Image (cartoon, rainbow, N blue to C red):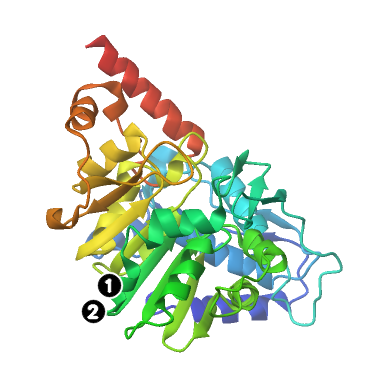
Amino acid sequence: LPGETAAHFQATADRFAQLPIQAVKIHNLHIEKGTTLALEHALTPLPVFMEYPFAEHLIDFIRRMPPNLPIMRLTTDTPDHELIAPRWHMDKMKFRNYIVAQMEAREWRQADLFPGHIHPDPPAPLPVNPVTTEDGSTTFWNDIVKEHYHARAGARLEAQGKYIQPARLHQQLQQQPLHLLDICFGLGYNTLAALNTAADTPHPLTVTALEMDRRVVRHAAETLPPHPDDTFNWATTLQQLHQHAHAEPLPDQTIKMHWGDARHTITLLPDASMDLIFLDAFSSPRNSECWTLHFFQQIKRIMRPNAQLFTYAAAGPIRAGLLQAGFHVGETAPIGRPRSGTQATLNPTLIQQPLPIEEREILATATRGIPFYDPQLVWTHREIIRDREKRVLQFKSQ
């Protein structure tokens, strides 16, 4: 309703949870054809929730409900031909699966905000296994994604060689404060190594981090061993992020965590607010959601004119997507594997090593240059891959 805020929703949910109710059916606002609300909406459009914002309010509502209260419905059912707004891009089952996956990844459950309730069971274990890399640092093997979080050459080596050094972080912090966006925070090596680097510089480093899986941060806090080169306690910082989504490991250094799908959480960030972006998602054959042209457009939106993006990835569809999103693209030195990394920026004078001419020609003329798409930022990995496969076939048939 006009003037309502999240605080109003939460207060209503808390009062509702104390009532003698036996079950809950949730209906989000739909504007249907032929209704008085439709006439009002035509004159003055009413605010309605799309999938991601509604999901956040719904998850908060579920967490405030009593532990044994059945929740029988999550969304309104309206025939498509009768619906004016909101026009969602997730069907009912996909939305349900999204809610379940988000609550599991964030370790949030029904009733964990209900007064006096303590869950009798610990959080479900994360399907990861610690692995010692060649430089002695610890990474994880993710048994769901079937990938390591870092190259076997070394987690610390990768953070330094693929992100900190190419970004010339120490030199930049000699001249000005920086706001770093760490997309797919994972175990935290990139952010924590950046803060190590910033410890003896005259300007502050502020970090905003995006991560869907809160469990991996908890597991990292419990697993990563201390290192003599660290300027602060990494485990304590990870514990603070896991518990409070905020940490201040050193004076003038802050980290703010946004839990959730990065395709949603990046839309919450202001335009032109970031100086540096580290993009460290799983590889595109496993996690294409963070490697699409449309996600890159969101990254471009939040970048300042001289901002730079660095990533380990170098696949053709990724570099092509960056180019088509309007970036100037270069490459960085290979670390821990034969292939180079990638640099992207809106300022061409900042490119350290341009892409080879041969690669640019291939990206412009061959199927390798067909990027991943995700127009509404809601497609599953499988949908993104299938869409690109269709466009590859269309290209070959021309």
| Residue 152 image position (x, y, % from top left) | 58, 45
Q: Residue at x 38, y 50 (%)?
A: 311
| Residue 215 image position (x, y, % from top left) | 66, 60
CA gap, disc 2 to disc 1? Answer: 5 Å
Nearer to me, 344 or 54? 344
Q: Residue at x 25, y 63 (%)?
A: 303
- Which label is found at residue 175? 2
Q: Amino acid at mark 1?
A: Gln
Most extreme residue toward the bottom is: 251
Whether tag 2 and tag 1 are in contact, CB under 8 A, the answer is yes
Q: Residues within 10 Å of mark 2 (few under 14, many from 20)?
A: few
Q: Amino acid at mark 2?
A: Gln
Nearer to me, 153 or 144? 153
Is residue 173 toward the left or the right of residue 326 in the image?
Answer: right
Mark 2: secondary structure: loop
Q: Quarter of the image containing the C terminus? A: top left
Q: Residue at x 29, y 17 (%)?
A: 394
Q: Residue at x 42, y 73 (%)?
A: 197
Is residue 109 toward the left or the right of residue 268 in the image?
Answer: right
Up the image or down, 81 lies above or below 156; here it is above
Up the image or down, 338 lies above or below 244; here it is above
Nearer to me, 364 or 332? 332
- Which residue carries the number 1 mark? 172
